[in-house]
Amino acid sequence: MMSPNQFLIWIALMLFAQVTRGQSAYLNSPSAMGKGGTGVSTFDSWASLSNPAGTSKHSQTGASASYYLPYFINELSAKNALILLPFKWGVLSTHFQQFGNSSYQENSIGIAYSKSLTPKLHAAFQFNIQNNRLSQSGSGHQFFSNMGLIYEASEHIRVGVAIVNPEQSTITIQDNTTALPSLFVLGFNWGPSSNFDISCELEKQDDYKSLFKLGFQYEIIETVWLRTGVFGKPWNYTLGLGLHIFDFQLDIGMTNHNILGLSSCIGITYLLKQKP
């Protein structure tokens, strides 16, 4: 039997899952969280969490790890681990994601291949498997895919598209069937200067209303980025910071839900030095 505390945690997890489906799906990327949940048209080490096409220009092998703490409740935390492996014919990336605790847990593994089809057009396909486990009922798993494109229309303008779970896969545990979220995201990035850019996105998740997101990033000095943004209606405000120290990059993001309060995400990336 489930104890009273486990039951309350399970109820909180179920409610949290429903609440977050009305928010951006990309808040567990520390760089995206800082700039309003925008990341579909971004080239960075966290791209496999938003649009794996954003890994196509990477030339350095790297590893990243992040910890997402919504509303500062440990039982609702999510952890990510990512690896980037560039090679002659493109870039392979993989990530592992875990959400929940011993009462209810979601684990997913994704493997993506990205490639620059032309100097301006970048594409990726990602294959995922997700396992959901409920302590009193057992577990179930399912496969689904991601697809992404980024087009560099000019030196200063990029357009990104990501589609997640177009198969509309579901997971069944005993007699209960749960639909995995299906997403369509269209994004636009404008960098009027080398140290400042603006991102805006429209995110559509299943039967929920479209979500508008707006983010800003400013490079204060060569190794420090300041980020901010808004998303949703009513607005949720975000703030973030990026630091590049030797071969490491630290990314921190925070957002404030108008009812549930503050959430945070912190991540660190290590990039191997390029061979001369």
Image (tube, rainbow, N blue to C red):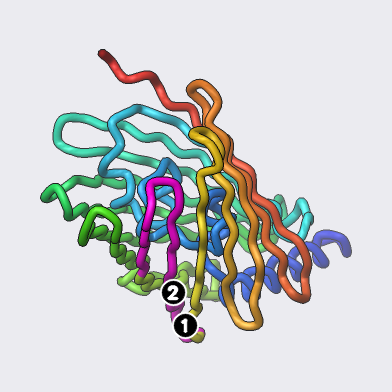
The crowding category of the residue bearing disc 2, from other C-alpha atoms within 10 Å (few below 14, some 14 to 19, many at least 20), is: many
Reply yes or no: does residue 206 show up in magenta: yes
First to last magenta residue range = 187-208
Rendered location of residue 178, percent (x, y): 51, 73
- Near-viewer residue (239 or 135): 239
Which image quarter is the N terminus in?
bottom right
Label 2, secondary structure: give it: strand
Q: Amino acid at mark 2?
A: Glu
Question: In the picture shown, does residue 16 fall above or below 97?
Answer: below
Rendered location of residue 220, percent (x, y): 55, 42
Label 1, secondary structure: give it: loop
Reply yes or no: does residue 4 show up in magenta: no
> Residues under labels 2 and 1: Cα distance?
6 Å
Would you name the residue on which mark 2 appears? 203
Rendered location of residue 164, percent (x, y): 36, 66
Give the number of the disc on residue 210.
1
Question: In the picture shown, does residue 269 fall above or below 240?
Answer: above
**Residue at horizontal 54 percent and vertical 67 percent from the top:** 173
Q: Are marks 2 and 1 in contact (CB under 8 Å)?
A: yes
Hey, which quadrant is residue 276 in on the image?
A: top left
